Image: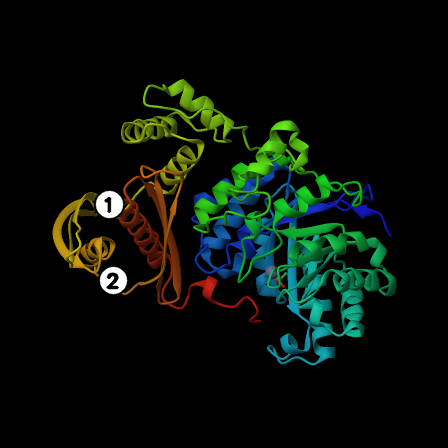
Amino acid sequence: MTDTTTPNGAKADKDRVLIFDTTLRDGEQSPGATMTHDEKLEIAEMLDEMGVDIIEAGFPIASEGDFAAVSEIARRSKNAVICGLARANFKDIDRCWEAVRNAGRPRIHTFIGTSPLHRAIPNLTMDEMADRIHETVTHARNLCDNVQWSPMDATRTEHDYLCRVVEIAIKAGATTINIPDTVGYTAPRESAELIRMLLERVPGAGTVVFSTHCHNDLGMATANSLAAVEAGARQIECTINGLGERAGNTALEEVVMALKVRGDIMPFRTGIDTTKIMSISRRVASVSGFPVQFNKAIVGKNAFAHESGIHQDGMLKNKETFEIMRPEDIGLAGTSLPLGKHSGRAALRAKLKDLGYDLADNQLNDVFVRFKALADRKKEVYDEDLIALVADEQTNDAYEHLQLKKLRVICGTEGPQEAEMVLAIDGVEHKIDATGDGPVDAAFNCVKMLFPHQARLELYQVNAVTEGTDAQATVSVRLQEDGRIVTGSSADTDTIVASVRAYVNALNRLIVRRQKTAPGEDVKTVSYHRQ
Ligand code: KIV
Ligand code: ZN
């Protein structure tokens, strides 16, 4: 096994595994997970602060919005290497370089699909593709001294051809070779064997960092990534919460915590401050509109909950009976007392700090007003309530075209249900009533009548934040219009109010997307596989 090089090329310790986060590129590519410019900047800052080595900030040629976000993230970066994605052509690579060049430590990541199925798309012969790889990696390396190259669908590429193209990329100057399991097809033993084979057979393999990039279609992304590391890979590509297309990418929190907890059998280190995991997980869930499943490893709501009697008994006697890591290790505050309506601003600030939220004064004021209103309706305000409240507050964009002003619904065993609504559209209030098949349907019909649109409701999901009939509901809504997919979310003790706010929030995002892209121009719907 060779020494690992740092993202800048300097020699580093051989057991250090670089964490390459692609939440803002592969994660954001997930239909509906689109983030706003400011949200991307905020997530990038959090990633940098938690010690991510390389942040893949986006795909600069894909749209003006992507370019602007990558450029700004590059400009603001502190420690992390900032990377942009580019297909195997000069135009993509030049645009990518333009976006990342202002980073303290820029990287160009260029790729091409090398498996038989992917070679057929640009209709290149093996030799033609090999030439293309040589030309494009050379071009990227002439611009930037930190170049990553990926043979997309590597795990379904013929081994001889894979060795040949990896060698070409190394000779052309690539400093990192990333091996993607694009369709989540590989299994741990195979993932390890592939890395081992490349390290053994490819001349010059010892001079670059090998990286693993796994998708979770068969639920093996974490295992495959760790197996690759054991075989010699020293960079893991991953996303927060495992966000990503289809079943997602390798989850950052899973590989990082697995390496930390099982250092006895996997003696590798990352530079991640694991106490920052929980807060970034919550923020990514909130801005992407992809809630974390309750039983998700590390960051799921139940990951540290020991409900059954036998577990609780064991936990009380000795925490290690059932706990292999401490909640504090991932930044989860130990259980503390809920707040109530007499709690003041200082108590709220302290509690939010414990939960990982360091809010600016004006944000804290807004949250405080909402907290008081919630505490009036709910006897005890739990951590989960506050998290939902802050997420809701942060979801509201600075300027909202549509704003729910008033809502009244009439429900009963006899349908149809009725809703009466006042909705402000660009500051002008409009009133209407409508009926529907249930109160949510009636309320959504009001919105549709006041703001006619063709967007299709693809997902409507309600979760209770805590237990009890006074619990807040968090609602997520996904809409689709002409290939543009947006999500909206909201929380309230009134499920119907939360539903309408989530719907209106999604429509506000759709309006912004319409202004930015003409139909069909939306990059997130343009396959990045196209050359
Ligand atoms: O899954 C994949 O192959 C990718 C590449 C662009 C690295 O995301
Ligand atoms: Zn991918």
- In this rendering, the answer to whether 381 lies above or below 214 is above
Name the kind of residue labelled 2 in the image. Answer: His
Q: Quadrant of residue 198?
A: bottom right
Callout 1: SS: strand
Name the kind of residue labelled 1 in the image. Answer: Gln
Which residue position is annotated with label 2? Answer: 453
The residue positioned 78% from the left and 64% from the top of the image is 194
Q: Quick check: can you spot residue 175?
A: no
Give the x, y percent position of residue 323. 65, 36
Depth check: give the residue in front, 275 or 220: 220
In the picture, measured across the screen, residue 530 lies left or right of residue 413, that is right
Is disc 2's CB within 8 Å of ligand 2? Answer: no
The residue positioned 39% from the left and 66% from the top of the image is 483
Tell me if mark 2 has few (under 14), some (14-19) or many (20+) residues whose alpha carbon lies within 10 angstroms of its own: few
Mark 2 and mark 1 lie on one chain; the one further toward the N terminus is 1
As drawn, the label of residue 403 is 1
Quadrant of ligand 2 in image: bottom right
Is disc 1's CB within 8 Å of ligand 2? Answer: no
- In this rendering, the answer to whether 66 lies above or below 523 is above
